[in-house]
């Protein structure tokens, strides 16, 4: 079996964290990730935050939720 590259590992971690999103902890993020295009947009946003700001995927979600409520 071929080992996953860093991008694949990051996408798996993002998926794991987005599966933990609920209407209580991040309602605006939850709404966005209901569609495939919304999920892909959120995934790209998290990838950029991880790369540029050094945050973990789990730390990105509350930041994005806060931005969406402004």
Image (cartoon, rainbow, N blue to C red):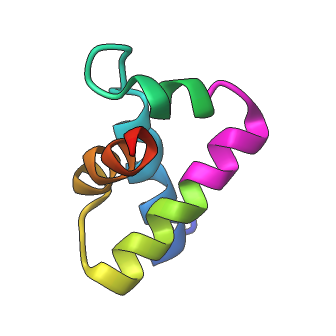
Q: Quadrant of residue 38?
A: top right
Q: Nearer the viewer, residue 69 or 51?
A: 69
Quadrant including the N terminus: bottom right
Quadrant including the C terminus: top left
- In the image, the segment drawn in magenta is 34-42
**Residue 14 placed where, x, y %?**
43, 50
Q: Quadrant of residue 68?
A: top left
**Residue 29 placed where, x, y %?**
47, 34
- Magenta stretch encompasses residue 15: no
**Residue furthest bottom in the image:** 52
**Residue occupying the point 36% across, 73% down:** 50
Q: Quadrant of residue 44?
A: bottom right
**Residue occupying the point 48% across, 68% down:** 47
**Residue occupying the point 34% across, 28% down:** 26
Q: Nearer the viewer, residue 9 or 60?
A: 60
Left/right of residue 59 with respect to residue 36 in the rendered view: left
Res 24 visible: yes
**Residue occupying the point 68% across, 50% down:** 40
Q: Nearer the viewer, residue 9 or 62?
A: 62
- Magenta stretch encompasses residue 41: yes
Res 1 visible: no
Count of number-bearing discs: 0
């Amino acid at each position: 079996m071929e080992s996953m590259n860093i991008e694949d590992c990051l996408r798996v971690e993002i998926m794991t964290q987005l599966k933990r999103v609920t209407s209580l902890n991040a309602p605006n993020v939850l709404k966005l990730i209901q569609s495939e295009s919304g999920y892909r947009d959120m995934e790209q946003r998290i990838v950029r935050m991880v790369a540029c700001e050094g945050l973990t995927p789990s730390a990105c979600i509350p930041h994005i939720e806060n931005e969406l409520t402004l």
